Amino acid sequence: MRSVVRPVFPFSAIVGQDDMKLALICAALDPSIGGVLVLGDRGTGKSTAIRALAALLPPMRAIVDCRYACDPADEDSWCTECRERPANTAPKDRAIPVPVVDLPLGVTEDRVVGALDLERALSQGVKAFEPGLLARANRGFLYIDEVNLLEDHLVDLLIDVAASGENLVEREGLSVRHPARFVLIGSGNPEEGELRPQLLDRFGLSVDIKTPTVLADRIEVIKRRDEFERDKAAFIAKWKKADDQLRRRLVAGRKRLSGMVIPDEVLESTAKLCMQLGTDGLRAELTLMRAARALACFEQADSVAESHLRRVATAALRHRLRRDPLDESGSGARIDRAIEEALGS
Amino acid sequence: MSAAGDAALAASLLAVDPAGLGGVCLRSLVQPARSDWLLMLRSLLPAALPLRRIPFNIADGRLLGGLDLAATLRANRPIADRGALAASDGGVVVVTMAERLTAHTAACLNAVLDSGEIIVQREGVERHDSARIGVVALDESMEADEHVPASLLDRLAFLVDLNGFDARTPLVQLHDAEDILAARQLLPRVEIAADIVAALCATGMTLGAGSPRVSQLAVNAARAAAALDGRVSVTVDDATTAGTLVFAARATQLPAPREAAPDAPPPDDSAAPPEPPAPPEPPASPEPPAAEPPAAEPPADESRREELEVEITQEQLDEIVLAATRAAIPRGLLASLRSDAQTRGSTGAGRTGTLRSGGLRGRPAGVRSGTPRGASRLNVIETLRAAAPWQRLRGRIVPGDARVRIDASDLRITRYQQRSQTLTIFAVDASGSAALNRLAEAKGAVELLLADCYVRRDQVAVLSFRGRSADVLLPPTRSLVRAKRSLAGLPGGGGTPLAAGIQSAFGLAIQAQRRGETPTVVLLTDGRANVTRSGVGGRDAAHADAMRAARQLRLSRLSVLFIDTSPRPNPLAETLAAEMAARYIALPFASAQALSSIVTAAAPRTNR
């Protein structure tokens, strides 16, 4: 029932918003960072950037006929069905695009977690599980636009699944568990409501974006948008080279990930910075370290340097500070100060 | 051009390119002009395209689509139902009473306006449908705190105000259906020069009119205007038309005055001469001053056109578009914008979650098996799901019967989360005596409490009283940032109308109770009332009034925290606190730390 894939605005053609682009690239390069939350003013191209990211991702290998697109190379993460396959036959696999699944507004719980297949139940009287969006997002991205408007009971679901990487369905006499490891991407306008702290914590990085205030940028935004609307194919073709190059860097960066060295002094700076800011738990340090590593890989550095740390610190820590929700200019400035104190300017 | 002309032109342009322009916010009470405008739009829009009315409180299932229950039962297999948005593809959706839209419904409309398609993941149905629509938001707001969600306004090209209309000046249709058809044919070929795009962006930015998205809408409007005129390239005239229609009503700032731009009459002059010879005003009709349409455009236009023959620089071009737009800004608009900048700046927020009512309160929070009775509602779809696997088995009893057989054990009811939302109302004494004493510290205390509210996800409201009356600075909202902002700008000085302050807090609290919320009042004052409820000075009378208001609080069993801001504990304040059965705290002279500990100790008790 899915319609043809709509042409999307090329990632490279997005004007400015470097923080957001960097965070998205880091999260795509290393899924263990845990996704990105993009908060910002209306009309700043949040959704555009996230959809563009989807088009940028290189395809992945998945087991044929697996409903959860299990990774043939990683047996530990397989779903029950893949595990139950006869051990002596190697599973067939094929290349598929990385799933980027939308959690649209007004979504109902049964479509999120999966439910009884109504069609088969009504016509054949068979009790079968129809996987939901969480299943489809496995190994890919789950995108929630207007994340602060999401219904509370869905937020509860997501918080749980995002932490465990597994979706447990117990409804209508069905009892199913399946892997649901995904990178959570959210966007929203902070003026329309606050986010639950637990959900905030599930996002690895968080970026604040603002309306461009430089006229030239604004004109460029409109010009490119207009050009795109007029002739999508031509516009995409025009930016294909830049997008391809970015994709190659992303792939190359991923390959470097396992071999990337993190010097002890950088680890020490990470810890110092987090202590300075009094962040709760170790998640902050882990995320900060992973994000710095991803950035180093993307930029093809030999090892992670303090400069990488500095550039991702705000995004990795902003939403983890013990909250002073009233501090408007807030967290960004606090982190800058802490960086200065912990690492020197 | 007159306001009537603008309104008519907006209808024509919308008919040319509904999806590209996003739509129109039509601010108008129910009146003939509004129906005329809608009829006009209908007659202009190609007949094959839908124009569909939807109510502001439309259910998700009808708006977005879902499972068509009747058809599903008949066919014995799931049949999807296209929602109103998908069914309006290519046409226009008219939202009635758009000022009452919830943030959620507005967000659904926004998503469709942004992407031109609708994604449905509901009730076992999954669909992607094209939904390239325009939205006409009928805005009937009368009070200051009602408004169409700002996120939606940001996506609608034109804001048209019909409230200022003289009922007897008819709306004159500027084009007919054939013009529109011709323009639609032409539209894909219309080119727009880069310098005109730049001029439109510059104008939008100079006037502080919305996000980059609004500039994009202006570009689309200019293009539609060119197409309507039968041209394939956008001229400066099209751009001025577009700028006027799109930016004028959104301006939040006036550009810094440049020295005498001879081709642009300053707005004040242009607004002075009255509109085209209007029929004598009926004495009965109230005159709305704010909507006075600016006039005296034609002469400016003439001179501009002559000038156009000559070479124009980018800067001049910017100036032309800007001048035209500026001339069209309704008088008084900027003043009113400035005065209520706080509420205006973040319209659309604050209404979230306050509108639930009726027997079934709260948000749906899952489903469980059970029999619907009293306060629970049958969830038909989940019930069907539960019954579905057994149909074959049960069907054997009467072969050939297509009806779905449902047992009592299949029944499922929707649980509603009865979240008792807490509302904390801060009533801050900003009078001269308080300002002298501790206004800054009181603000600090409120901020500490706000941090607490954040943890509990409370709603907050802020009101202040000084001089003769109390003002609600911030209606109930969850945005603490706004609460803080509203406090930061709070000036001090004047008398202490304590009774009015208490009353105002009481009013808010009662409203919250009616919505099923739990209100808590936090009153920060030194207790020295000196202005009565009627606004007259006099210490004794004022105190008596305040005591009366305090009794009201006690009688309605509201929980109140009284923070005494006077320099030393004050018997007057203590009596007042006792009268309202409040928890009394004297704001100590102390470090922020000590203050914080007192506030945190007090807060949980008052919020029970």
Image (tube, coloured by chain):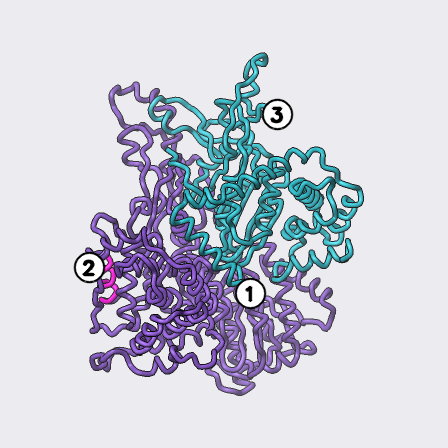
Chain colours: A cyan, B purple
Q: Chain of mark 2?
A: B
Observer-nearest residue: A107 or A341?
A341
Please provide percent x and percent y for residue A172. 45, 29
Please provide percent x and percent y for residue A18. 58, 52
* CB within 8 Å, label 2 to label 3: no
Q: Which residues are magenta?
A: B32-41
Label 3 belongs to which residue?
Answer: A74
Give the overall secondary structure of the magenta segment: helix
Quadrant for the C terminus of chain A, please.
Answer: bottom right
Callout 1 amino acid: Ala
Choose mark 1 or mark 2, whichever is in front: 2
Residue A5 placement: quadrant: top left
Vertical position of residue B572 compared to residue B444: above or below = below
Please provide percent x and percent y for residue A54. 51, 40
Please provide percent x and percent y for residue A294. 66, 41
Label 2 belongs to which residue?
Answer: B176
Residue B226 placement: quadrant: bottom left
Element under disc 1: helix
**Quick check: do tags 1 and 2 share a chain?**
yes
Vertical position of residue B497 compared to residue B230: above or below = below
* CB within 8 Å, label 1 to label 2: no
Count the labels in the image.
3
Callout 3 amino acid: Asp
Q: Is residue B470 magenta?
A: no
Element under disc 2: loop
Left or right: A3, with A135 as reference point: left
Callout 2 amino acid: Asp
User: What whole-number distance in Å separates the C-alpha atoms at marks 1 and 2?
Assistant: 50 Å
Label 1 belongs to which residue?
Answer: B483
